[in-house]
Image (cartoon, helix red, strand yellow):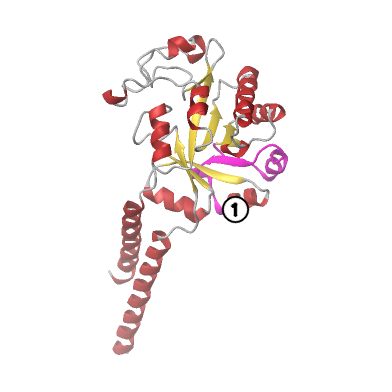
Amino acid sequence: MKREKIQFHKFFLLFVCISIICSSLHWLFPYKNYTKIAHRGDVASAPENTMAAFHSALNNGFDVIELDIHLSKDKKIVVIHDSSVNRTTNGEGLVRDMTVSELQKLNAGGWYSPRFSEEKIPLLQEVLDEFAGKIVLLIEIKPGAETPEIVDQLATQLKQTVDAGVPEKMLQIQSFHIDTLQHFTQRAPDFPIGLVLSAPINLIQMYTYKKEISFLSIHYTNLTHSFIQQAQHYGYTIYAWTIVTPLQFKQMQLLGVDGIISNSLERREENRYYAFLQSFLEGHRLLERFFV
């Protein structure tokens, strides 16, 4: 009886070891390639929403640059995330209350590092001239900036960019507001359009929105297998935002998202080590449960 018990423990220990190895392999190798989207540019290397961050994203292997737009006082589209300049420049005030000339006098990189003190708030047209056709641009119309003026001007600028030879598929638009996106598609129906979500939508909304919307950009904490399967059934591409840790990268790949919006590229060697360690710790806890 004692011998049989020892044999059982040996068999069970072997089973646990194999499970740990399989779990490690399960995490070490991603199940699905994904589109690598630079959140406000490559902000791990340069200040957000600047030409330096966009150049770094282009040169370091990202597939898409995500950027944010607002309208200046003199009705020009500028690239900045916040409605004010306070956080990312040496100035103060609302973007909509300042002209382009005033905005571009500000230092948009010194807060990040002194070596970026020459960076300015870019015009959208400057970004289009420099990057359109070289890398996909994902342009987000920010809350508070969603006026008919910015939508009409954005549609005009993007159509001019297409006329210059850039494919529509390389110019994507997203917003939190479906009304804004519907207005844009009336003006420019051939561009990929995405709805940004902080919470899932239901099946009725999925069905209704699919006429205008081609992708859903959703906060990673709200993503599940069932939601992704339902959305993909209706033909949506799924982007997850904003991914930071190695474990989050792996979780999103295992869920099967199509794109990951992140502040840095996934460091594969670092992630493999982290994934292996995570699997080892899980196996160790399982062993403790049965043998300690």
Q: Over which residues does the magenta segment extend?
A: 198-225
Looking at the image, is 95 positioned above or below residue 28?
Answer: above
Q: Return the x and y of residue 141 as percentages of the image width and height.
A: 56, 26
Q: Residues within 10 Å of mark 1 (few under 14, many from 20)?
A: few
On the image, the x and y values in percent for residue 267 come to: 35, 49
Choose between 42 and 13: the one closer to the eye: 42
**Location of residue 264 with respect to 67 vertically, above or below:** below
Q: Does the segment drawn in magenta span residue 152? A: no
In this view of the protein, can residue 263 be seen by the observer? no
Label 1 residue SS: helix
| Quadrant into which the C terminus falls | bottom left
Quadrant for residue 58, please give it: top left
Q: Residue at x 62, y 31 (%)?
A: 162
Quadrant (top left/top right/bottom left/bottom right) for the N terminus = bottom left
Q: Is residue 249 visible?
A: yes
Q: Position of residue 134 (x, y in %)?
A: 50, 37
Residue 17 figure quarter:
bottom left
Q: Is residue 49 left or right of residue 199?
A: left
In the picture, measured across the screen, residue 183 lies left or right of residue 169, that is: right
The single residue placed furthest to the front in the displayed view is 164
Q: Amino acid at mark 1?
A: Ser
At a point 60% along the width and 24% down the height, the residue shown is 157
Residue at image coords 37%, 73%: 18
Residue at 36% of width from left, 22% of height from top?
Answer: 119
Percent x, y of residue 210: 69, 41
Name above or below for residue 170 compared with residue 9.
above
- Magenta highlight on residue 204: yes
Using the image as rendered, state which of residue 3 and residue 43 is in the foreground: 43
Residue wearing tag 1:
226
